[in-house]
Structure formats: structure tokens, C-alpha cells
Image: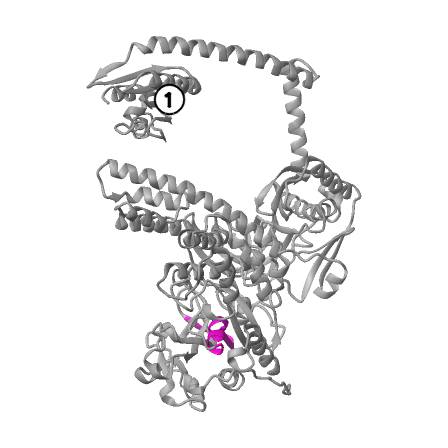
Amino acid sequence: MGVIAINFNQQPTTKMTSQEIRQQFLDFFKSKEHLIVPSAPIVLKDDPTLMFSNSGMTQFKDYFLGYKEPKSSRIADTQKCLRVSGKHNDLDDVGRDTYHHTMFEMLGNWSFGDYFKKEAITWAWELLTEVYKIPKENLYVTIFEGDEKESLERDNEAYDLWKQFISEDRIINGNKKDNFWEMGASGPCGPCSEIHVDLRSAEEKAKVSGLDLVNNDHPQVVEIWNLVFMQFNRKADGTLENLPAKHIDTGMGFERLCMALQQKESNYDTDVFTPLIAKVEELSGKKYTGILTDEKDIAIRVVVDHIRAVSFAIADGQLPSNGGAGYVIRRILRRGISYAYRFLDRKEPFLFELVAVLQNQMGKFFPELEKQGNLVAEVIKSEEESFLKTIENGLLRVEKLIQQTITDGKKVLPSEEVFELYDTYGFPDDLTRIIAEEKGLTIDETGFEAEMTKQKQRSKKDSAAKVYDWVILEEKPETFVGYDQLETETYITRYRKIENKDGEFYQIVLSNSPFYPEGGGQVGDKGVIENATESFEVLETKKENGLIISLINALPKDAGAVFYAKVNAADRRNSQANHSVTHLLHEALRDVLGTHVEQKGSYVGPDYLRFDFSHFSKMTEEELTLVESKVNAKIKENLALQEFRNIPIKEALEKGAMALFGEKYGDNVRLIQFGTSKELCGGTHVKSTSEIGHFKIVSESSAAAGIRRIEAISGDKSEEYFKNLETQFTEVSQLLKSKDLIKSIEKLLEENSVLKAEIELFKKEKAKDEIQNWKNDFEEKNGKKLLVKKTSLDAASIKDIVFQLKKENSNSVIIIISDAGDKPMITVGVSTDLESTYHAGNIVKELAKEIQGGGGGNPGFATAGGKNLKGIENAYQKALEI
């Protein structure tokens, strides 16, 4: 390869902006004949081992494993990364030091079977010392010292190469933890060589050598670049095997590099963060001083860090939710809101206003942030509003809990209730702790930790799955034939056992698979593989590392035999009808609502479809009807499928194809066209729109801020829907003995209204009688009056009676136990002058145990419902003892 000449106009490091630093990195490796590629989405959709990109190498994993061919053997990029779950989790450190982040950029250069250690080390030294002008005496490097247990030798090759550039006393042996890089429990791995920079003053360096501070969490002696020499694959059983070829995987922390080049003592003092901090100062009225232990400054660091992570995740297609990756994003955002609420006195949404600042900073390099900025801000604002309400409601619950604890004469809040506030209501446990301390109380820390441990164990048990290594029967490329065939002759090329809470299963890969793997919103195919002697149900089909994997519940006796694979044809037919109709629906929504509409997620199964799209208001009935009619008109046109299976993405986009939100596309794509509807899609589809039959919208609702959701049916399910309506119409006609249902129902409603009025009058009269009967039934006890009664009156009537009786009777406690509607209910009233002695909420909570129920209220009035009617008598007797 020839060398491309490039002129680096080096500026003084103190004036170099973060954008210039990023650009110089990419330009340098472009001069070394690297292809510059964009960052992959931060959210991973097709990797069962990871939720998020946690390193620069994630998008290239298939290249390291040999599943895919890279478009170039040399690549460089800057990759958005998120480390908030699993093995790589920095969340708890964020805000409390100067250099850990949830979302960060990883600058990287890659070699896929091309160059190895020599070039990686040489170019790293050249870039840092000659281009970025970092003083050589400020740098230290580490190498892998070896590991006897794994039979891994010391990396003497890296040591000898480093000796050419740096004195041997600056080359440090590192253990497996620091100098053997692994992406996860399994996958590509190898020894690594870290480069550390010492940013301390000359006086500090004279006192303590940087040699003693490397990898010791010193805030100014930090790792900035890790050169990973990828040569092994960690198998599920823990053993190592050689990769098909040796690769280079480097990762340089962009934020730390900026700290070094801009001569700052903290990442947060660089222009990566200072514009965001300035905006927080403006919005909060708080001044950032950069003190590590100052809660206000910690809060500002948390806010500016977390807004980056959440914004990029939403821009890449992951909305906050209550499960999976969405829960992680919601947790990060709520952590930021909580810190702002407690330490910046922000009781109103404001984090969403930082999105515009972030767009201005990073939109050039990450256009998805520029494009999705309005949506990101709307989603964050909505989440802020929701969680701030949660905090306000939680504060009321905490106050009640504190009052109850004080009333009981205790000093420690019970762990179960503190954990319930945290786990069920999302109220931050540290906020409960702070409020308790202000009242001279503590929380049961040991008990709370025990509850947390139990929850983690439950979660781990629910999701636990042991995955064994693949057993390779034949090294052969697997082929998906499901676009054209639902049945085919095939054989198993590899299998592996998995164990989870449901039992023992086997994942298989077929030489020819007709089973569509879950992806693009469409569910994976089910079906059967069979031959003359054995038959196995295919329970699901997914894709992993480029392999189509089907799940069966037992291993064939002869795994190498020839089988016949059959897709469940009815399910496939309905799924692909629903998938095709989502394309027509997308186009119709854009026609009716405007071109701002973009798909934001979908589910396509045999029973129904779900389609999420960007739109900022509820659709009207007229809009829904118009969309539905437009889709059905396209169905009636009998538009033939035009499929372009493997065309360059540029050509597809020139044809007018829509690229969907949050998806990452390769150089070649599949284009699906029905008339004017054109989308990039890998799913299965009908051959013509008439196969869809009919389209019916079932519901339209909000999925998140700025995101609407349509649920709909088509094909067989649409037919069933109208048959059910017809059956219901017939049954109602027979019941009403009329075919004019509207007129008959109007008559019924009028009669019902008259009867309701009569019943209400009857209830009021009965309530009056009860009040008169009960007035003389109060029992005097120690100068106080107690009334306990059983009745069948309804809740509203009882409430009126209780308030009237406690108003007329001072020093009184009133307990009414009802079985109205065969449901037990207890109502307690306490007159105002006794509220400091007796608490209605506490009384009702105690009595409700007898009816297997729960409830609460304030000191003067409380109610509880239950399940056990037989417990009414016990509750009555218990009430008499008060």
C-alpha cells in the first residue's frame, strides 16, 4: 500500500477544541489507509449477549469471529459507548470522580487480519507524541505479564516493540485483570497494552513517581489508550481457542484525551462538558466549582453526563420503559432528575433544555442527534414530568412512614417499606435516607441490602440461562431459503445445549433454513424438523452472530441425519401479511399526518401488529378512518411485490427507499416495494397486497412523549374480528327482540337513568334511617365514644354517614363494616379532637388484615377493601376492642 501524505497543522494543545482532537485522530488513521466509518448505534438489537455497545469493538465482533467479511481490513472510527450494566458498569462512579462516564466516545483503529502489534504500537506512539505533542516523559505503558492458570506467557513481543520508543523503566507488567481484554464472559479477547498519561505538576511528580500511580485510580494518572491484540476466542466453558486470524482492536477514551490535550485536571473541565455545565448553571442558578465532594457539583456532573447517555440512546431508537434496555435508560435519566431535584433545587423539568446544547456540540459528527433532537427533548421532558410526580407522591409516603415510625416509638424505618418505595414506586432510597436523618431517624441498612439482594437473585433466576459451546458437525455456510420456500431438505451443521428456568433445550443451525429469524420487528418462525424416525418442534428462531438459530426441546439421536424442515405456514402467512401492511400503514400515516411521521418501532406477529411512529398529538377519529381507508385501498389494488434482494444502499436510497429509525444497514440491502411504498426491510412479505385481505385499526394510543402507537389486525384475524361483531349483533338483537339496536339501547338507557334516580333516593332514605338508628348506639369508653356497625350500604352512603356522625359526636371513633356487592369493606372515621390520639389509617390497616385486604387514609378518615367476606365477623369483634 502506498502512503497518503497528510499535513497536520498542529495547534497549541491549550487551544485545540474537542472537535479538532476528534478530527485529527480520524485524519491520522486515514493517512494510514484506514477506512473511516460512522459510529454504530449505541443500542444493540441483534446481540443476545449485550444491550448496548460497551466498547468500540462491539460492531466489529462478527469480523473477529469470522462470521462476516469487513469492507476494509483497516478501519478507524469514533464509537458511542455505554457502560451501565453487566461486567462493564461505571454508573456508580459517575459524578464522584473526574473521569468515569456512562456514555463516552471510544476512538479506535482496527486491523482485521492485516497489521498487528508492530504497526499498532508504532502508530499510537506517533499520534500521541508527534501529532498531539504529548511530552514523552509523561507517558507510561503496560504489557500483559502472563497467566500460569491459563498457560499464557508474558507478552515479550509487545515489550520489545515498546523498548524502541520508551525507557524500560516506564514499561510496566500488568496482570490479567488489567492487561487481558475480554468483551464479556465469552467472545473475542487477547492481551493488551495500555498507555497512561501523567498530568500532574512537576512538583507532584518529583514527590511521587508516576510509575507508582499507574492503575491506582489516581485522577491525573489515567489510561487514555488501550491496544488490544485480539487473538483468542473465549468459549462458554472458559477455555481459549485461537481466532482464525490475528486482529488489532484499539480504544482511546476521547474525553480523557481531551483532558490531557487541553491541560485540564478533569474531563468535566474540557469543552466536551463545559457548554452543558454552563447551561445547567444558567437554568439552576448554581455555580459549578469542580469540587469532588461538593454535592451540588456532583449533581451537575451527574446531570451533564447522564443527559448525553440518555439523548444518544433515544436518538438511536431506545425509548425509556419498564423493561430491558429501556429500563436502563429510564434508570439513568431518573438518577439525573433525582440529583437535580435534591441538590440543584430543580422541582420542574429542565434536563430536556440541555439537548439543544448537545446537538450544537456533537450534531456534526453524530447526525442522528441532529435529526432526532426534537423527539429526544420531548421524551426527556415527559419522563421528567412523570418522575417528578413520582418524587412528590413518594415524599408523602415517606412522611407517613416516618410519622408511623415515630408513633410506634421507633428510630429505624423498616427495610421492607423503604424497599417498596424504591422498587415499586421508583422513589430514590438515598432520598428516603436523607429525609429520615432530618427527622432523627435511620433506615434499616442491613435489611434494605438484603431486600436488594433478594430482588437481584429473583431477577437473575428469571433470566438465568446456561449456554454451552457449539458442537460443530460441519463447517459449512448456512443459507436462509425462507423468502422462497417454507419447506426444504436440510441437516444440522452445529448445535449447543442451553439450560434455563423452563428446562433443557438445544439450539441448532441448519444447512438450509426456511425459518425466518426474529428481526425487524417480525417474530421468528416456528415449525418442525422431521425425518422417517424423529420429529422435533421448532419453538423459536433467532439470529446471533450471523447464524440462524432454531430452538428444539431435545437433541436428535442422529444429529447428522437428513431432516425435512417445515415452517408453520398459517403463522407465517399471517405474520407476513401484517409485516407488509406496516409498510402501507407507514406510507398512509405520512400522507395523512405529514412527512414528520417516522417509524419508531414495531411488532409483527401472526395475531396482530403494533406500529410506533413520531407524532405529537392524539389522532382524531377522522384521521384514523382516513388512514384505514387508504391502506385498504392499496390492498384492493392488488399491488405486486417488487423485491430487490441485494442492491447497494446508495442505489436503494436513490430509488426513494425509506431507511428505518434505529436500524444499521450494510453496504448492500434489500428493498421492498408495493407501488409507491418503498422501504429497506429484511422481513418476509406477501407476493401481492390482495393477500392481506383487510386491514383494521384496533387502537391508537401514546407509547411515549412524541410517539403514538397503532395496534391493528389483518388477514385471518381481521375476518375473525368482523365475524365476532356479526355474532354479537345477532345476540344483542335477540336479547332486545329488535333489529333497530340504536333505538332499543336509547330506550334502555332512559329506563336505566330513571331507575338509578329511584335507587339513589332509596339509598338516601335508608342512610337517613341508619343515621337515626345509630346515633343512640355509641358506646362510652373512658370518656370516648365508639360506634361499630355492620351494614350492606354502599361506599358513598357510608362515607356520608361517617362524616355526619363524627361531626355531630365529639371524642368519637366510628367503624362501619360493609358487605355491599359481596365485597368486604371497612370504613373508619375519627372526630377531629381525637386525631392526635387515634389514626383512622392505622386502624383500618389493622382491621383489614381480617378480610385479606388493604387500604389507608388520613388521621380522620380511611377505607379498606378486601377479599374475605368470612373475615367480617373477626373484624367486627376486633373493632369492638379499640
Q: Is residue 759 above or below residue 479?
A: above
Residue at the extreme right of the image, as rendered: 637
Q: Residue at x 68, y 18 (%)?
A: 741
Say which of 716 and 867 sits in front: 867
Say which of 795 and 603 sits in front: 795
Element under label 1?
Answer: loop
**Residue 530 horizontal side relative to residue 740, left or right:** left
Q: Is residue 265 above or below residue 785?
A: below
What is the x, y in percent for residue 181?
43, 72
In the picture, the quarter occupied by the C terminus is top left
Residue type for callout 1? Pro
**Residue 651 horizontal side relative to residue 364, left or right:** right
User: What's drawn in magenta, residue-wise?
Assistant: 240-262
Q: Residue at x 70, y 56 (%)?
A: 658
Q: Is residue 515 in view from this perspective?
A: no
**What residue does disc 1 label?**
824
Dominant secondary structure of the magenta stretch?
strand
Q: Is residue 817 in view from this perspective?
A: yes
Q: Residue at x 56, y 82 (%)?
A: 11
**Crowding near the residue tagged with mark 1, few <14, some 14–19, many ≥20 C-alpha atoms within 10 Å:** many
In the picture, the quarter occupied by the N terminus is bottom right
Q: Residue at x 31, y 23 (%)?
A: 830
Q: Is residue 489 above or below residue 747?
A: below
What is the x, y in percent for residue 212?
32, 80
- Is 302 part of what is drawn in magenta? no
